[in-house]
Image: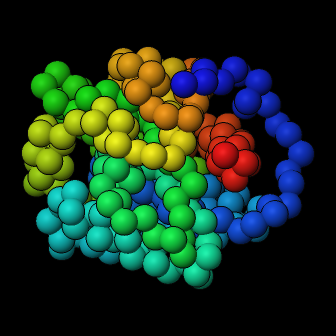
Amino acid sequence: MEIVSAALLEPHAPTTPTRQVGVVLVHGMRQDGSAWARQVDHLESLGHSAVAVDLPGHGRRMSERFSFRRAWDHLDDAVASFPRDTPVMMVGQSLGGYVSLGWAAQRTTPDEDRPLLGVVASGCSTEPRGKPVRLYRDVADGLVRAGSSVMRRLAPGAGNDRDDRPGWDLVTDALGELSGWSALADLEAVDVPVWLVNGARCHLRWQEQRFARTADRGALVVVPGIGHDVHLDAPDDYNRVLSRALADFARD
């Protein structure tokens, strides 16, 4: 696993993609697809297609109970929305990172019309069981209490104080799924490059070196001074990582 230097985050001249990529973005717990507004704008400015899904129990799918299987169905639908012969990159943050890794691992019959190029997984470099599940619960609670102001500032319309936000029944469902899950097993099964992108102050990066050793053909990026929601706290840095990942995945 390559450990990417901080130079990766330095600005570089944008390039016109030789091939359009379809990017699926999967949000974290108690957020929704609008949290990816800055990334969608960036990817589309580069000529790629981007779909920010709402997971079960979130956003437009608030009435659905969360489960990995149901979440994967929505990722399948997002991938199918791209034109045929469009390669795909999966991007997931926190809960969405675990969902994305699981989706990539369980693809027993890869889509030849829309091949998966790689996965970018953020804020999910810890096995989600035992103490990590408790840490995840604490992170989710902190985001609920403090994250709405950040989301309003960086992604207009996301994280607003409103009565229709996901409740703690959603957290219970999600943590119940995570408690029996092994992200390391998913990483071992994924047959495309995986990039792990974490904020230096993220509580869920404490096994990132083990994750880095397990992931195949990928990279580990740690963004200095940033917490769990790296795509919201440091959107410009995160977008540079996405640009570099797209370029590297296309060459792999």
Q: Position of residue 40 (x, y in %)?
A: 61, 62
**Residue 190, picture quadrant:** top left
Instruction: Report the front residue among 24 and 171.
Output: 24
Q: Quadrant of the N terminus?
A: top right
**Left or right of 122: which side holds 70?**
left
Q: Position of residue 232 (x, y in %)?
A: 53, 44
In the image, residue 21 sits, relative to residue 120, either above or below, namely below
Q: Position of residue 26 (x, y in %)?
A: 42, 56
Question: Which residue lies at the image location 65% right of the left edge and 24% below the top edge?
Answer: 4
**Left or right of 149: which side holds 117?**
right
Instruction: Report the front residue among 37 and 239.
Output: 239
Question: Which residue lies at the image location 36% right of the left edge and 66% below the top edge?
Answer: 109
The answer to whether residue 67 is seen in the rendering is yes
**Left or right of 168: which side holds 77?**
right
The answer to whether residue 243 is seen in the rendering is no
**Residue 114, picture quadrant:** bottom right
- Which residue is the extreme one toward the right? 13
Q: What colour scheme was applied to this rendering of the protein?
A: rainbow
In the image, residue 240 sits, relative to residue 246, either above or below, namely above
**Left or right of 1: which side holds 46?**
right
Q: Position of residue 84 (x, y in %)?
A: 58, 81
Question: Which residue lies at the image location 22% right of the left edge and 57% below the top edge?
Answer: 68
Instruction: Report the front residue among 227 and 90.
Output: 90
Question: Which residue lies at the image location 37% right of the left edge and 38% below the top edge?
Answer: 187
